[in-house]
Image (spheres, grey):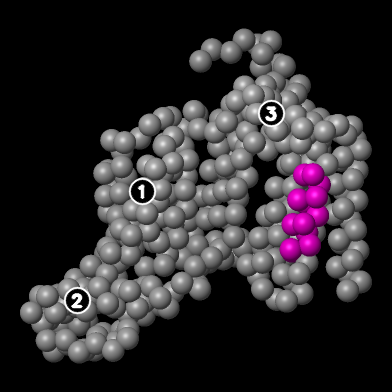
Amino acid sequence: MLRSPAAAATRKGAFAIPGAMLALAALVLVALTFAEWRAMAHQWWNIDTYSHILLVPPIIAWLGWIRRDELARAGLRGWWPGLAWLVLGLAVWFVGREIAINTIAQGGAVMALQGAVLALWGLRAGLVLAFPLAYAFVLVPFGDEIIPPLQMVTAEIATALTRWSGIETVASGILIDTPAGLFIVAEECSGVKFLVAMLALGLLVAHTCFASWNRRAWFLIACVVVPIIANGIRAWATIFLAQYVGAEAAGGFDHIVYGWFFFALVLALVLGVAWRWFEREPEEAGWSADEIAAMRWVEQWEGCAPAPVTIGIATLLAAGSFAVFAQLV
């Protein structure tokens, strides 16, 4: 699509002041919640289960970039309820720190940034950016809580397939005893890292490539079910191979296969099957400015837009108040 220089200049002007104010607010909020962002970055970089999250910030930036024209058309203006979301996020962050639950504190840090966007850019901009704003929650590492049940499911699948293969098997929980030796479905073999990565990818593809909620639901179900079944098959394959080449050799083969190569195979399977039902290009995903303007409730909820300087100062004061409060408590 060709764009005139005048249109580009208009769009640039529309983003200049609101963009600068959002950048300043984001800098202040990240500084306030720096411990949480540092902890998240450490997990992204050093823990294999969460390494896929390193791709999420550029994905969010890309999602925002392809919506820039709709943002300019929707208009950027302050919105007081957005400030309430920012304050709620900081409250969640503070509570999470006080009770020493990192996931809650980190989720609150993300909410605060979402609130800054809503407060400084407005309800219409928030609706244009609804998915990338919500997708920001993927930045919070999660998955450790589901490791034990995933271990059990993997063990059940592997045990069933091993018995189906005619191999004498005695199983108890995550322990699988066979003639070739005793196998344990360890935490690193639970498949959690591929499940959370597939969920992150599934949410992105479901939004950008599907318009039907029914197809989105089926695709997300596949993103959960297929990795779990595939991981059970992988565990069975290791046990089956061990009966002929020994447990050590089979384990070595498993370590080679069980990596991003395995994830690529599962990903190719899910996307390969779903591709024929893709309904749109990523640029077409999300509400347009015209669709938002047609929503009657939007104008009612917008109310009177505060001056940019007023909402900007209020945003900084909210962050500063929590900074002082956190030091005093």
Q: Which mark is residue 296?
A: 3
- Image marks 1 and 3: residues in contact by CB distance under 8 Å: no
Q: Which mark is residue 178?
A: none
Evaluate whether residue 71 shows in this view.
Answer: no
> Which mark is nearer the camera, 1 or 2?
1
Residue corresponding to mark 1: 218
The residue at 31%/42% (across/down) is: 274
Q: Considering only order in the chain, which callout, 2 or 3, is on the residue closer to the N terminus? A: 2
- Label 1 is placed on what type of residue? Trp
Q: Considering only order in the chain, which callout, 3 or 1, is on the residue closer to the N terminus? A: 1
The residue at 86%/61% (across/down) is: 322
Residue 88 colored magenta?
yes
Q: Write down the quadrant of residue 190 in the picture.
A: bottom left
> Which percent across, then down, holds residue 222?
34, 53
Q: Which mark is residue 160?
A: 2
Relative horizontal placement of residue 27, taking residue 320 as reference (left or right):
left
Q: Write down the quadrant of residue 71 in the picture.
A: top right
Dot 2 lies on which element?
Answer: helix
> Which percent across, then down, holds residue 220?
40, 51
- Whole-number angstrom distance, CA of label 1 to CA of label 3: 31 Å
- Label 3 is placed on what type of residue? Arg
From which residue to which does the magenta span run?
Answer: 81-93
Q: Examine the rendered structure and indicate whether residue 52 appears above or below residue 131.
A: below
Q: Examine the rendered structure and indicate whether residue 101 appears above or below residue 225.
A: below
- Label 2 is placed on what type of residue? Ala
